[in-house]
């Protein structure tokens, strides 16, 4: 049976988040830089694990992230009153064709997105604490809650930092934008300079290190490593990469709060994607051509702060200023991590608020404070972030978190296809070429393969940066993801039944009459 022709004038009906319009494309872009800042964590892991063989994998996944930004630019401009970014665009895409299924797509996607983003705050505060402890030579004494040792200083700095970041988050997007702009300028400008600094010192560069995309031991890209063939290994590390590289989409969380989304969406998302494409590619390439494969194979370089210092020392030399250089790098990385942690608290709070407004999550998360901020969602994020600090290690949190993050993209990419195919006449202030609906479907298929093949493979082998198997954290992530069913059931069968009589009475009360 052929599809019914689309109406000539088609209007998309959706639930508004009701958040105030207080920012513009710059606010969305600069807070969204929290996604691209994650390069500070992923670039060292990729190049020290795979060497130059990481470059093709990084390029493919990063390009897919840029394309996702373009798709989100179209979707966010179409739905300018939705909040929470990527997951909030799934429901309108499915609700007309499969209304009952669409409700769960909406709730599950937002919950998966929350699981993907909120652990960024504890992870980044843990990494920031490492730099602080190292710079001030603080005690490494601590305890082992599961199997990863946590220093007392790391615990205190991480928890204290998360609580302090809650202050600008709860004060509102206007205040948060000023705070984020200051952090972005202080971190991204020097990070960008590091990515291209080798241009000014060509004598330290060896482009031959990129030749044939070899591993750190000099073997071919197609050689087995960590007990896996090149294809399995590439897909396994793609699971890790997608947690970082496609996080460029973070700017979309704030398009619903821009004053001119028709204009702001395309500017913010294009800039975010292009800058991400640049920084995620250039930082790993810079490490490879300056440090070299033999240097990257040195286990001492697996610590992010060590590799940035090593790189800078090779480019700028060592001497009287080397100590100052190390301090400047540490400060830059700390500020970058803090900005990313701020977005993790603020962005996902909007996803929880939108899901609650749509009716799939407890009403507790609908509350908005006097600054127009979903403050209860913020508090929830802060408490959950503190709990994740006790996981202690980056690879554990990567694995736990990406069980949700990557899963949240797939329904949205399919939803983009559905809107373009069955609602072609919808208002689209920013419209991509028609063939992009097939590109979106292709990326969704690629992410499905990475999720179900790459995820368990990465978690079950010692190919990660710490050489630890993290499969238990993969299943913890699955358990948290499935808890959506419990939260949805509580909303539907407890809260909605409790509020049904009052809401029905309010609906029957004439305008201006006393209830």
Image (cartoon, helix red, strand yellow):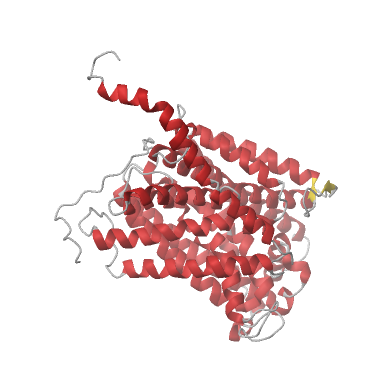
In the picture, the quarter occupied by the N terminus is bottom left
Query: Which residue is located at x 17 percent, y 60 percent?
Result: 4
Query: Which residue is located at x 48 percent, y 66 percent?
Result: 447
Q: Is residue 442 left or right of residue 319?
A: left
Q: Is residue 114 left or right of residue 163?
A: left
Question: Residue 334, position in %: x, y?
Answer: 66, 50
In-front residue for pair 450/27:
450
Question: Residue 389, position in %: x, y?
Answer: 69, 46
Q: Is residue 40 above or below residue 219?
A: above
Q: Is residue 500 left or right of residue 203?
A: left
The total number of labels drawn is: 0
Q: Is residue 382 above or below residue 514?
A: below
Q: Is residue 333 above or below residue 159?
A: below
Query: Which residue is located at x 66 percent, y 83 percent?
Result: 224
Check the image and name the residue furthest to the top. 514
Q: Is residue 234 visible?
A: yes
Query: Which residue is located at x 69 percent, y 40 percent?
Result: 159
Q: Is residue 329 visible?
A: no
In the picture, the quarter occupied by the C terminus is top left
Question: Residue 470, position in %: x, y?
Answer: 69, 61
Q: Is residue 53 above or below residue 41?
A: below
Question: Residue 117, position in %: x, y?
Answer: 55, 50
């Amino acid at each position: 049976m052929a599809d019914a022709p689309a109406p000539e004038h088609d209007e998309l009906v959706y639930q508004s988040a009701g958040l105030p319009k207080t920012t513009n494309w710059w606010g969305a872009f600069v807070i969204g830089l929290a996604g691209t800042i994650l390069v500070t964590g992923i670039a060292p892991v990729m190049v020290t694990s795979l060497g130059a063989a990481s470059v093709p994998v990084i390029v493919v996944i990063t390009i897919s992230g840029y394309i996702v930004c373009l798709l989100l630019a179209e979707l966010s401009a179409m739905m300018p009153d939705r909040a929470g970014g990527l997951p909030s665009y799934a429901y309108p895409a499915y609700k007309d064709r499969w209304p009952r299924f669409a409700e769960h797509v909406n709730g599950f996607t937002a919950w998966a997105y929350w699981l993907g983003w909120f652990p960024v705050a504890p992870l980044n505060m843990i990494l920031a604490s490492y730099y602080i402890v190292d710079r001030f030579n603080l005690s490494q004494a601590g305890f082992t809650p599961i199997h990863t040792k946590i220093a007392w200083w790391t615990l205190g700095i991480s928890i204290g930092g998360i609580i302090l970041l809650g202050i600008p988050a709860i004060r509102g997007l206007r205040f948060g934008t000023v705070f984020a702009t200051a952090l972005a300028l202080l971190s991204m400008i020097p990070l960008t300079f590091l990515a291209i600094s080798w241009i000014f010192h060509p004598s330290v560069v060896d482009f031959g290190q990129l030749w044939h995309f070899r591993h750190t031991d000099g073997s071919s890209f197609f050689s087995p490593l960590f007990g896996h063939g090149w294809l399995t290994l590439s897909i396994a590390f793609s699971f890790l990469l997608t947690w970082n590289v496609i996080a460029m989409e973070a700017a979309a969380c704030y398009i619903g709060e821009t004053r001119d989304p028709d204009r702001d969406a395309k500017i913010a998302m294009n800039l975010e994607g292009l800058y991400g494409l640049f920084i995620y590619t250039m930082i790993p390439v810079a490490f490879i051509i300056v440090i070299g494969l033999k240097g990257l194979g040195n286990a001492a370089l697996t610590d992010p702060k060590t590799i940035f210092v090593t790189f800078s020392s090779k480019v700028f030399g060592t001497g009287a200023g080397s100590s100052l250089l190390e301090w400047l790098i540490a400060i830059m990385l700390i500020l970058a991590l803090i900005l990313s942690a701020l977005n993790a608290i603020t962005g996902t709070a909007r996803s929880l608020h939108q899901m609650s407004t749509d009716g799939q999550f407890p009403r507790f998360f609908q509350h908005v404070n006097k600054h127009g901020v979903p403050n209860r969602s913020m508090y929830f994020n802060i408490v959950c972030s503190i709990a994740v600090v006790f996981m202690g290690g980056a690879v554990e949190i990567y694995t736990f978190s990406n069980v949700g993050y990557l899963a949240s993209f797939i329904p949205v990419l399919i939803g983009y296809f559905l809107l373009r195919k069955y609602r072609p006449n919808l208002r689209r202030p920013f419209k991509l070429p028609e063939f992009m609906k097939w590109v979106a479907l292709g990326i969704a298929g690629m992410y499905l393969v990475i999720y179900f093949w790459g995820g368990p493979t990465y978690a079950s082998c010692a190919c990660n940066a710490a050489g630890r198997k993290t499969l238990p954290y993969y299943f913890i992530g699955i358990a948290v993801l499935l808890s959506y069913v419990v939260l949805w059931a509580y909303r539907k069968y407890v809260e909605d039944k409790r509020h049904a009589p009052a809401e029905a009475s309010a609906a029957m009360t004439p305008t201006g009459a006393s209830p």
